Every structure is written in C-alpha cells, then in structure tokens.
Image (cartoon, grey):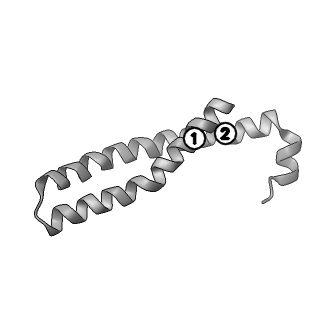
Amino acid sequence: MAFTLGFHIILASFGVAFPALMLIANYRGLRHDDPVALDLAQRWSKVAAVLFAVGAVTGTVLSFEFGLLWPAFTGRFGDV
C-alpha cells in the first residue's frame, strides 16, 4: 500500500502542476509565434493524459486498499 500511495501522491502532484506548464508553453507559442513551445505543449498534453489515466487507476486501487486494510479507520473517517 505504501508504494501505491507514494506513487499516487507523485502522480497527483504532477497532475496539478502539468496543466499550468502546458498553459504557459501554449501561451508562449501562440503569443510569440514559437513553434517549439507549441510542439512542447502538444507533447506535454499526451504525457498529461497518461498521468491522468495512471493516477485514476492508482486512486481506485487506493480506495480498495484503504477499505480492505484499514476498515475501522475508513469507517470512522470515511464520511468526510
């Protein structure tokens, strides 16, 4: 469970920061007519899609792990 949680935290951090980086690269590409920045934003969008998919899978696995491994803990704090 520790591996899944650690991996999910890393993916969630990248998932929050990556759209901002893509926005900056896309803005720079459109505003300054920079084809390299536009290409970078396009490639990063594919990476962000993969990160989102893997993050969704690890999040689903985590919900089952919390329910199976710590049922008393999730019973007490699960309604938050």
Disc 1 crowd rating (10 Å Cα; few below 14, some 14-19, many 20+) is: many
Residue at position x 64%, y 38% from top? Answer: 5
Locate residue 58, reporting x and y percent. Answer: 58, 38
Q: Amino acid at mark 1?
A: His
Label 1 sits on a secondary structure element that is helix
Residue most toward the bottom?
Answer: 31
Q: Nearer the viewer, residue 34 or 57?
A: 34
Q: Which residue is mark 1?
A: 8
Locate residue 56, reporting x and y percent. Answer: 54, 44
Q: Is residue 62 above or below residue 12?
A: above
Left or right, residue 60 beside residue 21? right
Give yes or no for contact between labels 2 and 1 (Cβ–Cβ under 8 Å): yes
Quadrant in the picture for the N terminus: top right
> Which numbered disc covers residue 62?
2
Quadrant in the picture for the C terminus: bottom right
The Cα–Cα distance between marks 2 and 1, rounded to whole angstroms, is: 8 Å
